[in-house]
Image (tube, rainbow, N blue to C red):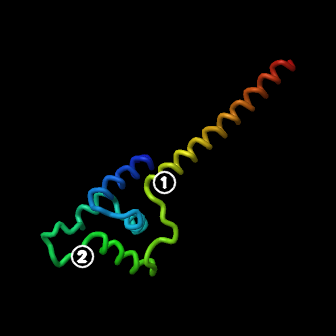
Amino acid sequence: MASRRAIIEEWMVAQKRHHLSDVQVQMARELGFKPDSLRKIDNHKQEPWKTPLPQHIENLYLKRFKREQPEVVKSLKQQLQEDAAKRAAKKKAKDTRRKAAQEQDDQSLNAE
């Protein structure tokens, strides 16, 4: 399974390729689209009866969730930064637990 970072990077490429805003990308993700599936439903100006991809995503989102856009919108870069900060905090907490356990083991060996 791909890491969260790799998935977000795929979405960043798809966002640039299909000229989508952060709101539209988040809508597509909440609708369950994959970055590769956007290529199939994108209007390449060869099919005039299709709605453009950004409008199509907005219409589907409105139809399914009964609202214009998500309540909280986060850009993909912001999500990557939050994940990195969360990962760093988790690593720091783990290191402090290991250090405390190591000190406790050292004290028990010294007591014997």
In front here: 48 or 19? 19
Q: Which residue is drawn at 66% across and 40% down?
A: 93
Q: In the displayed structure, would residue 94 be above or below residue 12?
A: above
Circle 1 Cα neighbour tier, 10 Å, few/some/many (<14 / 14–19 / ≥20): some
In front here: 108 or 58? 58
Residue 106 % position (x, y): 78, 22
Residue, disc 2: 51
Amino acid on which disc 2 is placed: Thr
- Say left or right for 105 vs 28: right
**Residue with the most extreme left position:** 46
Q: Indicate the secondary structure of the residue bearing disc 2.
A: loop
Label 2 or label 1, whichever comes before in sequence order: 2
Considering the image in quadrants, where does the C terminus appear?
top right
Residue, disc 1: 79
| Marks 2 and 1, how far apart at CA | 29 Å
Q: Where, by quadrant of the figure, is residue 41 drawn?
A: bottom left
Q: In the displayed structure, would residue 91 be above or below residue 81?
A: above
Circle 2 Cα neighbour tier, 10 Å, few/some/many (<14 / 14–19 / ≥20): some
Residue 48 % position (x, y): 15, 76
Q: Which residue is drawn at 34% across and 60% down?
A: 34
- Say left or right for 35 vs 72: left
Q: Where, by quadrant of the figure, is residue 55 drawn?
A: bottom left
